[in-house]
Image: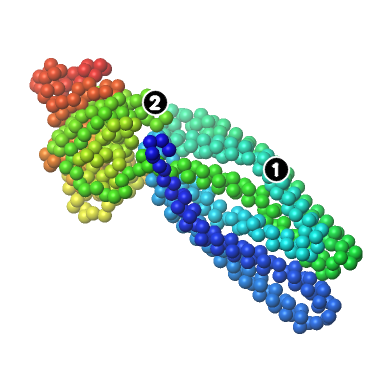
Amino acid sequence: MANGATSHDPLKGIIRRCIPALAIVGVVTLITTVSFLVVPIYMMQVYDRVVASGSFSTLFALGAITLFALLVSTALDYARSRLLRRMAIWFSQRTGIDAIEAGIRQSVASRNQTAQSLRDIGEIRNFIQGSSIVTGFELLWTPVFFIVLFAIHFYLGVLGLVSAGCMIMLSYLSEIVSRRSLFEAEKRSLVATATIGNSLRNAEAVEAMGMSDRIIGRWQKENDIALDLAEHANSRLAVIGAFSRTFLLYVKVVVVTVAVILVLNNEMSAGAIFAAFIVTALMLTPFSKLIDTYRQVIGARAAWGRLRTDLTIDSRDARLPSPMPRPTGAVTVDSLVYAPPGFSHAVIRGISFAMSPGEVVGIAGPSAAGKSTLARLLMGIVKPTSGSVRIDGTSVFQWERRSFGSFTGYIPQSVSLFDGTVRENISRFTDVPIEDVIAAAKRAGAHEMIGHLPFGYDTRIGDTGYTLTGGQRQRIALARALFGEPRYIVLDEPDASLDQEGERALLSAMRAAADNGATVVVISHRASVLQVTDKILILKEGRIQFYGWRDKALEELGLLPAPGPERRLVKAVDSHAGR
Ligand SMILES: Nc1ncnc2c1ncn2[C@@H]1O[C@H](COP(=O)(O)OP(=O)(O)OP(=O)(O)O)[C@@H](O)[C@H]1O
């Protein structure tokens, strides 16, 4: 990989840890395979010895041995399926955490929410606990049956080999005729699911603007293509499946015919007819499952490939593994450049500035200037294309996330609250005394508002809970950002839905946090908010137009702070930024 970067693939370690269990499954399958041979041996012995000698004691002894061997085989079969089920559960538990982290990484990078990794884990789990792995090992051990067939008679061995070869060719044919259609069907089906998932998230707009028929139409188009492709592949597979079932019957008839001819030619005993028949049937059983197994393998292989891509972390994207101590809060931004993944056009174009603890820095500028992108870079949510953002000398992107979160507060541009109570949302799902939650709510000026909710701090909110207004959501988000007295706070338009009282609370909360030693960054279009900042940064087309003390900004912009500073400042910021 370029620049000496390496990548960490967690699935490699998982496979390594599965090897002992798979080895046990392999050995158990060998034992059960061999134990199946007791049936043809029993048949041969009964016919050749018991019938000839008329000895009941031999018959019962042979019966007892056969029953015991089959009983052992059943117990091993049960133990094997239990082991595979446990392995499947372990796999999904072990990869589930990585998959959720990968989902968060992808959502942040491409802003495209996806739970595909979790669905892929489900598919692989079903594969592990299904019949495919056992069938694979059964195929591996079929030489045992070939040896026995050859031992009975050379011709029967050759017949077994030829028919197994035909079954392999039939399943290979099924792969050729269905691979592309099945792959394409799966892709289309994922697109259809993504289309409907996105529309459900925008359900209000869909409903209000009567778009549901067009949304359904878009989904239907993709879904119909997926169904057509799957049907095309499945009908071809069905033909091959029917043919291979009939072929199996033919093989058995041919085996019996050849065996009888050999007996009539005195080349083997009559009991060997039964043995040859049963051994051939046992030998062909895993081959007959090949077509179904193949379909499961295709699905699991695609899921595995996607999961590997999602879970593999480039060493350049990795966070530091160990927690870091609470910093003083000195932030330096150095030659920062950011181009969204897959785009060559930079949104942030080489900016440098510094912020000190105790400062409130206001960021302003026209729409699409790159303000929210800068906020995400300041929080270490996305990785800079080049340059860096550091707190006390450590890159914010690389900072171990749990310790980073313990000293930071953030309000994203579109406020999102989690499914849970107000208390859980403010405390970020940590188990802390209610007093700490109330203190954060008071600092955000949200305590009284929360008191008016149906169950106060225990009111359930989020997608399925009590519906909050935009202003209420923003106040709770501010309380969440201020929880734990953070040293570094980034607020992206925290005032968008606030009334005057809410705005007053926001301004005093920002000031109090800074007076307490925090570094506060606020993005706002409102002059009233920018008025309480210490410094102002004006961004335009990803470049800094102005960065300096607020009063100097006013001076440079040729404005007096009073009277009516708010309106004048906004006008000045906009005209300076060329809006
Ligand atoms: N992941 C991304 N993929 C593609 N383009 C992106 C991505 N993130 C940001 N952009 C583009 O970068 C530009 C800056 O976006 P950003 O949201 O940072 O602007 P902003 O200054 O916050 O605007 P506003 O004030 O309207 O919120 C926009 O043109 C946006 O379309």
Q: Kindly tell me whether residue 153 is visible in this rendering.
A: yes
Q: Amino acid at mark 1?
A: Leu
Quadrant in the picture for residue 319: top left
Whichever of labels 2 and 1 marks the residue nearer the N terminus, that label is 1
Q: Position of residue 148 (x, y in %)?
A: 74, 64
Q: Position of residue 215 (x, y in %)?
A: 50, 31
Of residues 292 and 425, the one nearer the viewer is: 292
Real-space Cα separation, disc 2 to disc 1, in angstroms:
44 Å
Name the residue rendered at 26%, 35% in the picture: 389
Name the residue rendered at 68%, 74% in the picture: 67
Above or below, 231 against 248 in this view is above
Q: Position of residue 346 (x, y in %)?
A: 34, 25
Q: Give the number of the disc on residue 344.
A: 2
Q: Position of residue 107 (x, y in %)?
A: 39, 38
Question: Where is mark 1, residue-wise?
Answer: 173
- Do the residues bearing badges 2 and 1 touch, measured as CB atoms within 8 Å? no
Q: Kindly tell me whether residue 501 is visible in this rendering.
A: no
Name the residue rendered at 43%, 38% in the picture: 1
